[in-house]
Amino acid sequence: MPDTSDFGPLLSRIAATLDRIAPPADGAPDFAAAEAFVWHPARHTFQPVPKVNRVPLSLLKGIDRTSGLLLENTRRFAAGLPANNALLWGARGMGKSSLVKAAHAEAAGMAQKLKLVEIHREDIATLPTCLQYLKASPYRFIVFCDDLSFDKDDTSYKSLKAVLEGGIEGRPQNVIFYATSNRRHLMPREMIDNERGTAINPTEVTEEKVSLSDRFGLWLGFHNANQDDYLAMVRAYAAHFKINVSDAELQADALEWAITRGARSGRVAWQYILDLAGRKGVRLDI
């Protein structure tokens, strides 16, 4: 018979871990467990995120105006003042989702009751259920959906419209909704045009589609970075992580990297820094 005397401490640690991640017995989410959560509709649970994947707001270069607007909106909401739902739309890799997470971190510093809840695009139809849990909580919540968009025959956008503004209940007072998208109206233009072309009243079809984005009071546009902004991003990352490299080498190397990628953006700058840090033997605390 195998010796199981050493299993006791291991089983105790496993049991303690399960207790921490399991929902409370009464079914109420334990929002004190973390500063951020991921909504899982199949189990009606909010998974705590021990460490949010984000960078400091000071490292997001080239988007000063938009970052200032979102941060001010978030701080007002954290303080219990009126604030708008926000749609961050535009060029890929320019820091839309990074800005949401960074703004939450900045505002949460002044309001410990501010939580970030991520809902996945494919779960957007379950948003009303998610909000039922949130509105009963004493905390304030930023509900965040990254890369939100809708395709043909997808009608879940109608439930989102009702939750944001149009329903009887509307959005709970302790909840605000932030979304990022590459599309200004969250739907492809050809989808709107095609349905308008076959409709009896084309104007009504267009209004139906674009009225979703109208539910966001704050629209923040992101555009492709120019060379100066791209280099500012690279320099900020290199200085923050204390990578020992001359400015001339950094600039030439970063521009060559951007050329090979065919783009200049915050994402490309970050990917370059990862490569540079690896070559220089620098460990990044991220």
Image (cartoon, rainbow, N blue to C red):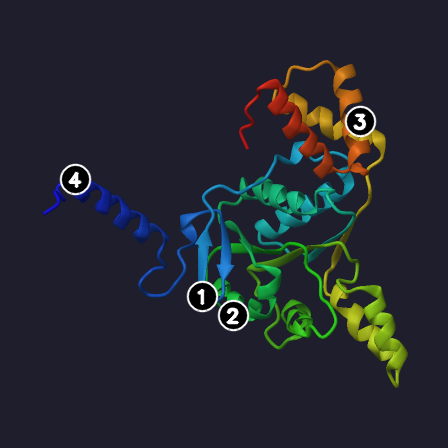
**Label located before the other in sequence (2 or 3):** 2
Q: Residue at x 23, y 42 (%)?
A: 10
First-in-chain label (3 vs 1): 1
Contact, CB < 8 Å: mark 2 with mark 3?
no
Q: CA distance from mark 2 to mark 1?
A: 8 Å
Mark found first going from the N terminus, 2 or 1: 1
> Mark 4 or mark 2, which is nearer to you?
4
**Residue under numbered circle 1:** 44
Disc 2 and disc 3: Cα gap in Å?
48 Å
Disc 3 from disc 1: Cα separation? 48 Å
N-terminal label among 4 and 3: 4
Which structural element holds mark 1? loop
Disc 3 marks a residue whose amino acid type is Glu
Residue 122: image x %, image y %?
A: 60, 64
In this rendering, position of residue 69 left or right of residue 197: left
To which residue does mark 2 refer? 129
Q: Amino acid under label 4?
A: Asp
Secondary structure, mark 4, is loop
Q: Amino acid at mark 1?
A: His
Disc number for residue 264: none
Q: Position of residue 258 (x, y in %)?
A: 79, 32
Q: Residue at x 64, y 73 (%)?
A: 159
Identify residue for label 3: 256
What residue is pinned by disc 4? 6
Residue sitting at the far front:
1
Tell me the CA gap for discs 4 and 2: 44 Å
Neighbourhood count class around disc 4 (C-alpha, 10 Å): few under 14, some 14–19, many 20 upward: few
Looking at the picture, tell me which residue is in the foreground, 215 or 149.
149
User: Image quarter for residue 239?
Assistant: top right
